[in-house]
Image (cartoon, helix red, strand yellow):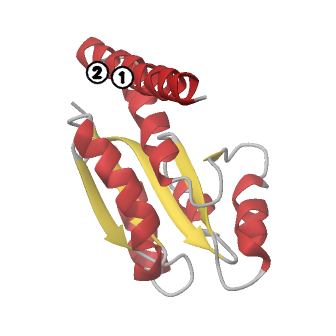
Amino acid sequence: MKKVGIVMGSDSDLPIVKKATDMLRSLDIPFEVHVYSAHRTPDEARDFARRARENGFGVMIAAAGMAAHLAGAVAANTTLPVIGIPCQGPQLDGLDALLSTVQMPTGIPVATVAVNGGGNAALLAAQILAVEDAALAERLNAKRAADAAAVLAKDADIASRL
């Protein structure tokens, strides 16, 4: 199975990235996590992205706040799918990161999830990998069914109390 490469611009993004790693772990998807800044360590971020395919990655996730250039920097250096997680920073409640992540020029796409959407980034990465992995597709189907059952159980509980 291909791995998911995860980069975060700062260790302050770890709580959001942990949502992604927890989800990937629950789906039995291998991953690797690094802290590389688009601005402070651009060479390392570039090299990681450029070597991603040959190092066994199938999808990349990049989490960053504020200027949030990391996903674009990764996407500029690989043709693997890149998923950006805009992270809420100290100003603008993450709107700055969201706009920076989603406004990519034609030719360098970045799929973007919600601000602080680590879990959905992992699920999107899993869905991309599941295109070629039937066992993973089944695990995703099972997760969806379990999620639906949990909602219906809550519905029944509320109905019985009211």
Amino acid type shown at disc 2: Arg
Pick whichever, 63 or 114, lies toward us: 114
Pick whichever, 74 or 96, lies toward us: 96
Pick whichever, 26 or 2, lies toward us: 26
Residue 14 locus on image (x, y percent): 39, 72
| In the image: residue 47, left or right of residue 103 | left
Residues at badges 1 and 2 in contact (C-beta under 8 Å)? no
Residue 59 locus on image (x, y percent): 41, 41
Q: Which is more N-terminal, label 2 or label 1?
A: 2
Amino acid type shown at disc 1: Ala
Residue 122 locus on image (x, y percent): 42, 43
* Residue 107 lies in quadrant: top right
Badge 2 element: helix
| In the image: residue 84, left or right of residue 96 | left
| Residue drawn 74% across the image and 65% down it | 100
| Residue drawn 54% across the image and 76% down it | 38
Report how far apart the C-alphas of labels 1 and 2 lie in the structure: 10 Å
| Residue drawn 37% across the image and 28% down it | 129
Residue wearing tag 2: 139
Residue wearing tag 1: 146
